[in-house]
Image: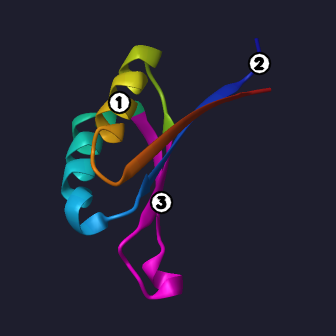
Amino acid sequence: MGDSRSIMAILVSNRATSALEVQKALSENGTLIKTRLGLNDGAVSGAPDSGLIILELVGKQGSKDQLAARLQGLAGVNVKQVELSV
């Protein structure tokens, strides 16, 4: 089997209400996160209410799924997981 990567994209549409809960969930699951990239839409549009977080994850799929479900349950948060392999 070739090399594979687990990616999670998190779109936060209302950072004012969801950012603290998103941060809490990510901090509590820090052992799953190998790489984290945060993109703030406010830098371009002047409206910092939304943002995109891209994660490279490691660990068991069940733990990744639990993190995704927790985040998806937050208001204004949309989550997608992608498995890439070569």
Task: Label 2, secondary structure: give it.
Answer: loop
Left/right of residue 23 with respect to residue 41 in the rendered view: left
Secondary structure type for disc 3: strand
Q: Which mark is residue 52?
A: 3
Mark 2 nearby-residue class (10 Å; few <14, some 14–19, many ≥20): few
> Vertically, is 61 above or below 7?
above
User: Is residue 60 among the parts visible in the rendering?
Assistant: no
Identify residue type, mark 1: Ala
Q: Who comes first in sequence, dot 1 or dot 2?
A: 2
| Mark 2, residue position | 2
Which residue occupies 25% across, 51% down?
23
Q: Amino acid at mark 3?
A: Leu
> Which residue position holds label 1?
69
Alpha carbons under labels 2 and 3: distance apart = 29 Å
27 and 21: which is toward the camera: 21
Asked if the magenta segment contains residue 74, the reply would be no
Tag 1 secondary structure: helix
Q: Which residues are magenta?
A: 33-55
* Label ID, residue 14: none
Task: For label 3, count other residues whose C-alpha is less than 10 Å away and answer few (under 14), some (14-19) or many (20+).
Answer: some
Residue type, numbered disc 2: Gly
- Identify the residue at horizontal 43%, vertical 65% (top origin): 51
